[in-house]
Image (cartoon, grey):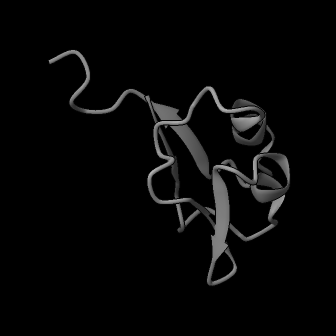
């Protein structure tokens, strides 16, 4: 599983950073996943941050290489 934030969809509310600061940060005012934390799907509150993102910019998806 991989966490990502679509910078074209994010409008920088910062909600993800408040909900899961160990996984998310803000870069140039937009939400971003902290480098190296892209696979921390089970970290506390990551799914809550994705589900509660007001711009629906956070996705949790299977990594392309999983299952190969």
The location of residue 62, given as percent across then percent down, is 38, 27
The location of residue 34, given as percent across then percent down, is 55, 59
Q: Quadrant of residue 50?
A: top right
Q: Which of 14 and 34 lies nearest the eye of the viewer?
A: 34
In the rendered image, the residue lying farthest to the top is: 67
User: Residue drawn 69% across and 50% down?
Assistant: 22
Q: Quadrant of residue 15?
A: bottom right
Q: Is residue 61 above or below residue 24?
A: above
User: Residue drawn 46% across and 37% down?
Assistant: 39
The location of residue 16, given as percent across then percent down, is 76, 53
In the rendered image, the residue lying farthest to the left is: 68
Task: Quarter of the image for the N terminus: give it.
Answer: top left
Q: Is residue 3 above or below residue 62?
A: below
Counting labels gives 0
Horizontally, is 51 left or right of 63 in the view?
right
Task: Quarter of the image for the C terminus: give it.
Answer: top left
The location of residue 57, given as percent across then percent down, is 62, 52
User: Residue drawn 76% across and 46% down?
Assistant: 20
In the rendered image, the residue lying farthest to the bottom is: 28
């Amino acid at each position: 599983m991989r966490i990502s934030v679509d910078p074209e969809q994010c409008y920088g509310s910062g909600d993800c950073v408040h909900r899961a600061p160990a996984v998310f940060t803000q870069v140039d005012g937009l939400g971003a996943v902290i480098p190296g934390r892209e696979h921390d799907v089970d970290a506390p509150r990551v799914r809550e941050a994705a589900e509660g993102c007001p711009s629906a910019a956070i996705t949790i998806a299977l990594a392309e290489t999983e299952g190969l």
